[in-house]
Amino acid sequence: MRASSFSRSTPPNDELRLVPVKAEGIRQPELRRRAKEGGATAVTKLYLAVLGVEEVGLLSVDVHVKDFYIYEIYVVRRCRRNRIGSYLLAQAERIAVEHGHPVAQLKPHALDPEHVGRDVLVEWYRGCGYVPISQGDSEFWLKRLAI
């Protein structure tokens, strides 16, 4: 699959890869904007999903000593509905396990609400095994990981 002819099917795993990056190293304007607006801290790590040579998604995680937070998953608008978000979520969980964290935490927040609403996002996370941290609070979610 060539980057210039993005299709609506799931890209083969060998074509989609995760690359660690700093915000200033991101070329794709939509992703660069998200990385700069994301409010990174000293423990934030940024990763790009790259398909061929095209930057198609952004993953931002906070790796603390005791906790692991998935801060942001963002897929370029024209590349959505191709399981790139699922790939980034799986990679975030892999990174958590590699750092010895048995739980991944996140706060479902629609970064592009006119295209993907919070309800859709919450259902996606639920389908991926995430649950609210407490019964009355649906703001923060977690998933127990096998380490």
Image (cartoon, helix red, strand yellow):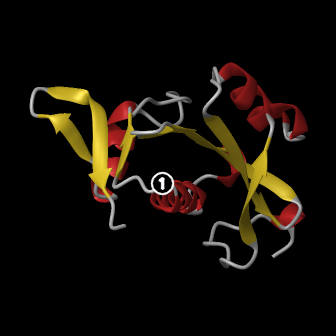
User: On the image, which quarter does residue 11 sit in?
Assistant: bottom right
- Of all residues, the one furthest to the left in this rendering is 135
What's the residue at 21%, 38% (across, down)? Answer: 132
Q: Work out whether residue 63 can be spotted.
A: yes
Q: Is residue 129 left or right of residue 117?
A: left
Residue 76 is at least partly visible in this image = no
| Element class at badge 1 | helix
Tell me which residue sits at (65%, 26%) in the image.
42
Name the residue rendered at 89%, 39% in the picture: 25
> From the viewer's perspective, is residue 69 above or below residue 47?
above
Q: Give the camera-side residue of 92 and 37.
A: 92
Q: Is residue 82 left or right of residue 143?
A: right
Extreme residue in the front direction: 65
The quadrant in which the C terminus is found is: bottom left
Residue at point 59% right, 62% down? 82
Query: Disc count in the image?
Result: 1
Q: Position of residue 99 (x, y in %)?
A: 51, 55
| Residue carrying label 1 | 96
Find residue 50 and report its horizontal and vertical position in percent: 77, 59
Measured as percent of width and height from the top left, residue 137 is found at 18, 26
- Frontmost residue, 109 versus 135: 135
- In x, y percent, where is residue 121? 39, 41
Residue type, label 1:
Ala
On screen, 39 above or below 10? Answer: above
On-image quarter of the N terminus: bottom right
- Report the side of 109 relative to 49 (left or right): left
Q: Residues within 10 Å of mark 1 (few under 14, many from 20)?
A: many
Question: Is residue 133 placed above or below 99 in the rendered structure?
Answer: above
